[in-house]
Amino acid sequence: MPDPRAFLARHRTAIGILLVAALVALGFTALETLTREIRFDDVAHAIHALSPVRVVLALLCTAGSYLALTFYDVLALRVIGRPLPWRTAALASFTSYTLSHNLGLSLLTGGSARYRIYSGAGLDGPDVARVVAVASGTFWAGVVTVGGVALLLHDGALTLAGWTLGQGATRALGMGVLALTIALLAGCAFAPRPLRLFGMAVPLPSLAQALAQIGIAVVDIAFASTALFVLIPGGQAALLPAFILAFTLGMVAAVVTHVPGGIGVFEAVVLAVVPVDRATLFAALIAYRVVYYLLPLGLGVALLAVYEGARRRHSRWLTGLRAVATGVAPLALGAATFLGGAMLLLSGSLPSIHGRMGDLADLLPLPLIEASNVAASLIGTTLLLLAPALYRRLDGAFVAARTLLIAGAVFSLGKGIDYEEACVCLILVALLQWTRSAFYRRTTLTSQPIALPWLASMVAVIGLTIWSGFFAYRHVPYSDDLWWRFALYSDAPRFLRALLGVAVVLAAACVWRLMAPSRVRAGLQASVADQRSVRDILDQAVRTDAMLALTGDKRFLLSAEGDAFLMYQVSGASWIVMGDPVGPRAAWGELLWNLRDLADREQGRLLLYEVSSPVLDIAIGMGLTIVKFGEDAVVDLTEFTLDTPRLRTLRKSERAVARKGAVLEIVPAARLDTILTEITEVSDEWLRIKGQQEKGFSLGHFDPAYLAHFDMGLVRIDGRIVAFANLWLTAGRTEASVDLMRHREDAPGGTMDFLMVNLMLWAKGQGYARFSIGMAPLSGIEDRRLAPAWAKAAAFVFRHGERFYGFRGLRTYKEKFAPAWEPRYIAGPTGVALLKGLRDLSRLIGRPQPAAPFPPADARFDLEEAL
């Protein structure tokens, strides 16, 4: 029987798309049913009849609601123990909610705004995530409380979506909902702090903080609902309980269904519950969308730009203003372009202004007017598809969006002299052109799938467009002639043809993404010039792990002077650097920053693996998170001798193997072919008995082309090779080490001790200063009470993970040589991105890349001749 969890994981995206589409369809089906008797003309008349006083009151209530929302973040910051000034929390809250209220992408848009502001105030990613979680808890606490009170006060039966509850059942439900509030308060009063769920510490407010959260949420909901209530002509106080209940249920339905902005779902619930003339109520809902959603969105983007300006002050105000705009462009213009596409789509589905159409008829022929209407709808659909690509800073999306917006402005004038739409399109074009440097990632749209939240938003907007058209023309009798009727005031045929065009564009986009070739990354093979430069720089290396450059599974980035390089590889979306850069330290910063810029342009994340302390200052400057990975064991050869009490056990083991006839032999790299067959047998036998397979990236692998670079240390007994290790030796004799160490199954116990000791003595005799024994992962990480979570987890794995990997045993074995321990670190992005980077690293090491080996050292003359 197939595993349901595996099935869900494999088809998660497809299931999510189908679920969102089904919810959107359900919402608009309910909306269609509830507005079946409403005429478009009646709604338009009701909107025009709204008095300025009601609009002003709605604006004031909207301001009160958003002011209350700022205290969601103020309280959340206090709950997690990171209080900030009100102005900082207010800016983060307002900009976040204005974006997420409109697009519904709370993590992508609202979360990005919060992170940008809070990170500048000293909070990290986990802190921001906790703020979001506590603020969400505040919202739900208020919704539960208000919903319970509204249910208790509701007079009469409650009917919703065909279900009817009597007054008794409604009040019983209200008491049950309020019981949840009481249980929440009791939990905050008596539960231990911090609350631990699934091994994670969850911040829990105190009783006073929980009461404050509920109070603030109630104030927010009261202002938000009043902003809609005052837009309903003839609204009486007796209507308030039913209205508040409808408003609360609408908010819950919008959040639970994840429909972007709650489009269709919120309106359907309110229309179903509130006993008011539906044409008037529907007009109020449309006005409420503008007052409560769209106007704060514009203000939120402006405030975000002002905040960016405060962070990027320049001596020349015009240069500084452009830097500000460039900083917010991907987020703000991605959302603005999406809404611009929605505007063009909705405009194409609604009737035109007859007075303007009369003037247009004197300027343009009818076929051009018809074509302009269809073209504007097609452009709107395409802009919806381009919005997420703008958010990802893709240069192709920038060029396409700029061109389409110019065309959209032209066609807006050509379909009905809609100069308001044309002005919006041209403003967006100007902003895109002004911030063109923000869209620098040279990747194709076909290689990047559209995320599920953007798909959900597209489905919602297109669904709203289709419903709006059929709502506006539901009283026009349908006939096949409608498709071919071209007349100045025939808006319904234009809508049908535009709808067909939208379907064509969406189908073409799906086929394009389905048939597009997958992105091919640059090959591994280094150029002859790079190989020569890397070899020249390796001659100056002071650490032996630089020899990993010769494994053939790395890419290289050279410094501008050609005197330093770093080696890296791409795995998934991670650009992983192996060890420190090789060459003068003065060039390290340039190399690491250049690679980070390259990774950012390719939408990748940078991860530095097994770097030493000198790299940390650069990594911190790049904003990377530092995690200790373990320690490297290094023996000082100038003082190394077996005749010391600390090495007594090692001395006994070495001499026991020597008495069995073991001898050390050093075979130069040029003579590898004379022993290759025999050491291949040893390697294959070792892999078999250990149940191992070849690794890559951070380790060498048994490959004749790779081993041909190194001298080989052999242990022979009676002339037979029983163990071997290839030697890493720096040209300046600063350090010696080994890479592959393998032995036969019947090798005497202690053979590897014999090999290591005699290699150290040999290296000391050759004048090498130190000998690296290699890494002990997770070694030296302390588990103290106030240590960070990663340190506690690493220490736990080090102590108890022996069944999976010999962490402790490896440290104990290396301790026999009395080494000095040098720390090694991992530096990468914050939060979940770091975990994804470590996952990509694990895959890179566990599944070696195709090798593109360097020619052996004695072929350098041939390389120079070839150049």
Image (cartoon, rainbow, N blue to C red):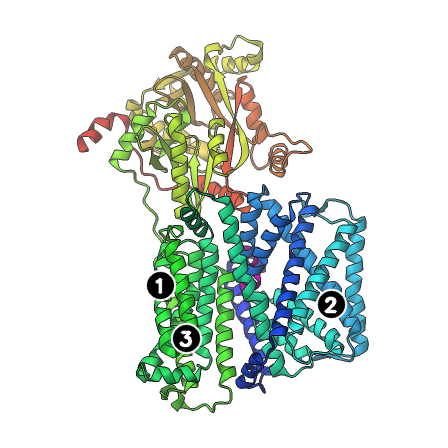
Of the image marks 2 and 3, the number of the one nearer the N terminus: 2
Q: Is residue 427 above or below residue 162?
A: above
Q: Residue 385, labelled with which disc?
A: none
Of the image marks 1 and 3, the number of the one nearer the N terminus: 3
Q: Position of residue 328 (x, y in %)?
A: 47, 52
Task: Report whether residue 416 is seen.
Answer: yes
Point out the stretch of residues depicted in magenta.
100-107
Which residue shows up at 40% across the image and 30% down it? 588
Q: Position of residue 777 (x, y in %)?
A: 54, 31
Viewer-nearest of labels 2 and 3? Answer: 3
Q: Secondary structure at mark 1?
A: helix
Q: Residue 147, labelled with which disc?
A: 2
Which residue shows up at 63% across the image and 32% down it? 799
In the displayed structure, does residue 708 sit left or right of residue 178?
left
Quadrant of the frame with the N terminus: bottom right
Q: CA distance from mark 1 to mark 3?
A: 37 Å
Q: Main secondary structure of the magenta part?
A: helix
Q: Is residue 853 above or below residue 231?
A: above
Q: CA distance from mark 2 to mark 1?
A: 49 Å
Q: Secondary structure at mark 2?
A: helix
The image quarter containing residue 702 is: top left
User: According to the image, label 1 marks what residue?
Assistant: 515
Was residue 288 drawn as part of the magenta stretch in this picture? no
User: According to the image, label 3 marks what residue?
Assistant: 418
